[in-house]
Amino acid sequence: MELVDQLVEQLGITPDQARGGVGAILSLAKEKLEGNYSQLTDAIPELAGLEDAAPGGGGGPSLLGGLTSSLSQNLGEAGVMVRLGEMFSSLDLKGDMMGQFLPLVIGFIQSKGGDTAKNLLVSVLK
């Protein structure tokens, strides 16, 4: 997949980390966008199913995972970033990697799906 290859090359991460990071972003987008998520995957078919690559938290629900899920529901946009940070951490991607990762993913989505697709994703991550 082109996006995974770009992330591996530009960030020096493994393909599994790249897929997992994209999957984490997309799984949150799917959750937050609900029925509108299909607009994103319709615009960029190669993204379909990548949300399944999101890390599951390492072997079942944890206390931290439950707290993070509660936080995300109560904190709205800030909670999304907390959950994303937890998923990145489980992929062995440090916090500063999110700042490098997100612009590349957003740029890719804009280049392949246009402003509408980009705006859908950005609305989840704001």
Image (spheres, grey):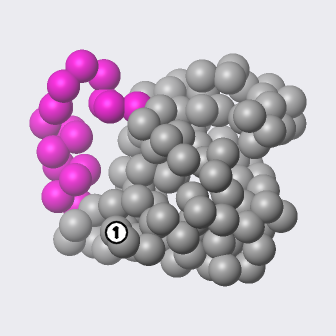
| Residue situated in front as seen by the camera: 87 or 33 | 33
Q: Give the range drawn in magenta.
A: 54-71
Task: State the image coordinates of residue 68 (x, y, percent, origin top left).
Answer: 25, 50
What residue did someone put label 1 on?
Answer: 34
| Residue situated in front as seen by the camera: 103 or 51 | 51
Q: Which residue is painted at 48% across and 65% down in the image? A: 38
Q: Which residue is painted at 80% across and 39% down in the image? A: 2
Quarter residue 111 falls in: bottom right
| Residue situated in front as seen by the camera: 123 or 65 | 123
Task: State the image coordinates of residue 80 (x, y, percent, origin top left).
Answer: 39, 62
Is residue 8 found left or right of 119 in the rendered image?
right
Q: Quadrant of the N terminus?
A: top right
Could you tell me if residue 78 is visible in this image? no
Q: Is residue 58 above or below residue 83?
A: above
Task: State the image coordinates of residue 33 (x, y, percent, origin top left).
Answer: 40, 71
| Residue type at tag 1 | Glu
Is residue 82 found left or right of 105 in the rendered image?
left
